[in-house]
Amino acid sequence: MKIVLGSDHAGFELKADLRDYLGRQNIAIFDMGVAEETPADYPGIARAVAEKISRKEFERGVLICGSGIGMSIVANRFPGVRAALCHDLYTARVSREHNDANLLVLGGRLIGKELAREMIKVWLESVFQGGNHQRRLDQIESLDKEMRGGREK
């Protein structure tokens, strides 16, 4: 599996830790930045990562900013992106099982490194359950298509 990562300055330290953790798990990482803790605006980073997911260049991704809220807002504007802002093991698990989330969003100022490592492990191991949940995702896709005026992705 290959994972695309991105963070702003507020998520840089946590992203670096998760990049190292994932590397030790033999998961290929593509880091979209930032490369340092110098203040950076999150919309550009979120866009770069979300575009990779939307274009199916990567199956999964992780975004980290201070609260995770801004990154989530940006990422979910892209067709086919299901970005889930998670704060604990339960939300990480059900974001995959119920929502087939393909982008995990974390708050770098809210979540410690150990919890974040556990969350990403659970998120990567959890499997979409389909069934009722697929029906709901189909409804979201239909709404997305309607909002784009019937245009395809």
Image (cartoon, helix red, strand yellow):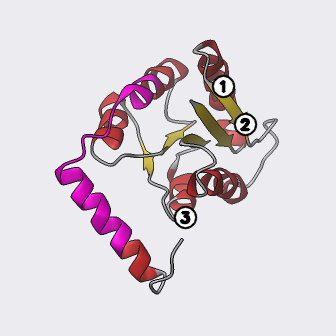
Place residue 5 in its image quadrant: top right
Identify the residue at horizontal 40%, vertical 37% (top origin): 87
Side of 27 relative to 102 (left or right): right
Specify the quadrant that holds the N terminus: top right
Q: Position of residue 23 (x, y in %)?
A: 65, 18
Asked whether the residues under the numbered discs 1 and 2 touch, taking CB atoms below 8 Å apart as contact, a structural biologist would say yes
In the rendered structure, which amino acid carries the disc numbered 1?
Arg
Classify mark 2: helix, strand or loop.
strand
The residue pinned by badge 1 equals: 19
Furthest residue toward bottom: 149
Q: Nearer the viewer, mark 3 or mark 1?
A: 3
Secondary structure of the magenta portion, mostly?
helix
Q: Nearer the viewer, residue 71 or 47?
A: 47
In the rendered structure, which amino acid carries the disc numbered 3?
Phe
The residue pinned by badge 2 equals: 31
Crowd tier of the residue under label 1, counting other residues whose Cα lies within 10 Å: few below 14, some 14–19, many 20 or above: many
> What whole-number distance in Å separates the C-alpha atoms at marks 1 and 2?
8 Å
The residue pinned by badge 3 equals: 78
Classify mark 3: helix, strand or loop.
loop
In the rendered structure, which amino acid carries the disc numbered 2?
Asp
